[in-house]
Image: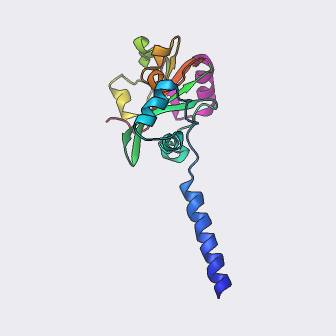
Amino acid sequence: MKKIIHTLTVFLVLIWSSSSIADPIAPLAPLNSMGKQMFAAEGKTVADALKDVPSKEMVGLPAYPDAYFSGAMGQEDSISYVFLISKASAADVVAWYGKNLGKEWQNIPALATNELREIAVFIKSDKKEISAMDSLKYQQIRISTVEKPEDTGFAAMTFDVSGIKSMINMTIKPMM
């Protein structure tokens, strides 16, 4: 009887621990000195920061293979937006998503915002004509070119963005 209880206990612990270790959407981008100071000021460690990286399952969209996680927005139990950065060119990232997203996704470059250096906007919809306002109803993956650290927005404040050439902004939960 003790053996059965012990075996059952070990089994339950293994199941619980494996379910709580989620596969992150992408590795956390390396922290820069300001990022390290910010975490230290809050009494947090890099291990604490890693807990904030959403899982692949939670995001439900593929991450470019060499991308780094640089942020997310949403509620505690649900993610609306995920922000990734990559050292790959934006053109390479666009080509990868073009090959790896399902047939229900389409690239609509007309929706790209020039001021944000966007070169592609993938929308999950079979509609052929989608306006900018209409696009708010769909999941999106927006890819931007990064020419200087400031092009990464808030990521440059916390993360080492040297060598970063592209940003990938994912809309998980559409606004409308």
Residue 17 appears in the rendering: yes
Q: Is residue 96 above or below residue 78?
A: above
Whether 132 is among the magenta residues is no
Q: 99 or 78: which is nearer to us?
A: 78
Which residue is at the front of the view, 37 or 21?
Answer: 37
Residue 97 falls inside the magenta stretch: yes
Colouring convention used in this rendered image of the protein: rainbow
Percent position of residue 48, x then y? 49, 44
Q: Which region shows up in magenta?
A: 89-109
Outermost residue toward the right?
3
At a point 62% along the width and 33% down the height, the residue shown is 100
How many numbered marks does the figure carry? 0
Front position in the image: 13 or 66: 13
Instruction: Report the quarter where the C terminus lies.
Output: top left
- x then y, percent, for residue 170: 47, 32
Q: Position of residue 41 (x, y in %)?
A: 41, 35
Quarter the N terminus occupies? bottom right
- In percent of the image, x 60 and y 30: which residue is there? 64
Q: Is residue 90 left or right of residue 141?
A: right
Quick check: 157 left or right of 162?
A: left
Quadrant of the rendered structure where residue 165 is? top right
Residue 81 position, x and y percent, is: 42, 35
Q: Residue at x 60, y 58 (%)?
A: 18
Identify which residue is drawn at 59% across, 26% down.
98
Q: Quadrant of residue 12?
A: bottom right
Image height check: is 152 above or below 5? Answer: above
